Image (cartoon, rainbow, N blue to C red):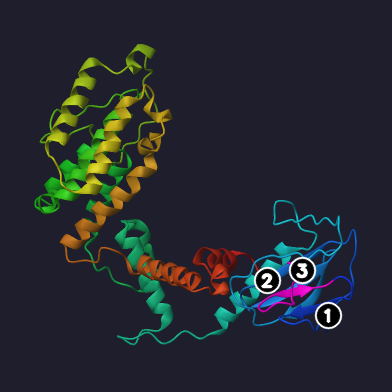
Amino acid sequence: MNRLPGWEKDSYGYHGDDGNSFSSSGNGKKYGPTFTTGDIIGCCVNMINRTVFYTKNGINLGVAFTDVPLGLYPTVGLQTPGEVADANFGDRPFVFDIEGYMVECRTKLRREIQSHSSPAPHGDNNDLDTVLKKMVFGYMVHHGYCGAAENFAKATNLYFFEDIPSIQNRQRVQKLIMKGLIGDAITLVQELYPTLLGNKPELLFKLQIRNFIEMINNLNSSEPQSHPYSIASLMNGSEDADEKMEVDHKPEINEADRQPSRQALEQLLLFGRELAAQNTQDEDLKRQLQEAFSLLAYRDPKQSPIGYLLHANQREQLCADLNSAILESHGLPRQPPLEMAISQSKNTVGRMLEEGLGAAAYCGLDQFLNCSLKPQ
């Protein structure tokens, strides 16, 4: 406790009485100006290049130490009785422009990444540009962006690996899911792909749970919806097959009509009992079903702690799972190459962070793309 930072092994310090820097030794090296009462001293540890520099009143004094180890802790040394140090760990703005410094580090790293040439892709002798175009095209086809995919194919001379009617059918199913018309989606899937849900009982159960949630969602809806009487008849609304008609005018609903009818509540409870009777052994599905049932405990489920289950964005993962299952049943990849590459990139960066590579904090894919999209 009577030794100043930098004197002990694996410690580093910048002393105000002489301006020297100390590293694991009582012998200091000339570094910067002295400092005293009223001065603001900052310390920046750069985990990318493992260096440390200090600032005085917002001025960078230059690199003091190199090759510093990980796991350093901030330390302040005081020798005079009554001395007081006011520490700022980011709860107030720094005097030094740390944000500008981070931008410089990020830009330098981005240029370093771009300076590396990409290896030639293996396989069919395609150049990297063609491979990237195929990845983008595959993403469009996978998610059913049929019109965009057709235009992209014409512009890039690429060919569809799935029939356009098949893509359109998947698109119809996805639209129903995203509108919350789960019963209609199940009916359409059974019509287009008769064996799919029979071979995927877990996926069918997920759809049924979501359908139960949508029934709760529609109890106080201003738009009347029909609900299933049984699992065998999972129709919760009607949808025009070609989906070309858009209705701009909606009939006015009286306040009394907004209240859930006794029949709707009975249908909801009946359907819930049928779901519970299936007695699934899958722990994750049990949890999802329990959460769905828990919505019934609240007078206003949308304002409850689990009200997020009623949000439209909760349909997205189910939509993706069903779309992947349809593709897999046709011998096509469950996940497009572009998403696989993004996932691999994120996992790699995550592993880099686990290994203590500071540069990983600045080379996240989202950060890199956002930086690339900004005008130079």
On whether residue 193 falls in the magenta region, the answer is: no
- Of residues 176 and 246, the one nearer the viewer is 176
Q: Identify residue for label 3.
A: 2
Is residue 138 in view? yes
Crowd band around label 1 with a 10 angstrom C-alpha radius: few (<14), some (14–19), many (20+): some
Q: Amino acid at mark 1?
A: Tyr
Crowd band around label 3 with a 10 angstrom C-alpha radius: few (<14), some (14–19), many (20+): few
Is residue 234 in view? no
Crowd band around label 2 with a 10 angstrom C-alpha radius: few (<14), some (14–19), many (20+): some
Numbered disc total:
3
- Of residues 249 and 61, the one nearer the viewer is 61
Label 1 SS? loop
* Mark 1–mark 3 distance (CA, rounded to whole Å): 23 Å
The answer to which of marks 1 and 2 sits earlier in the sequence is: 1
State left or right for residue 208 relative to residue 112: left
On residue 45, which mark appears?
A: 2
**In percent of the image, x 30 and y 37: which residue is there?**
291
On residue 150, which mark appears?
A: none
Label 3 SS? loop
- Magenta highlight range: 1-15
Q: Based on the displayed image, in which of its 4 quarters is residue 148 positioned?
A: bottom left
**In percent of the image, x 67 and y 67: which residue is there?**
102
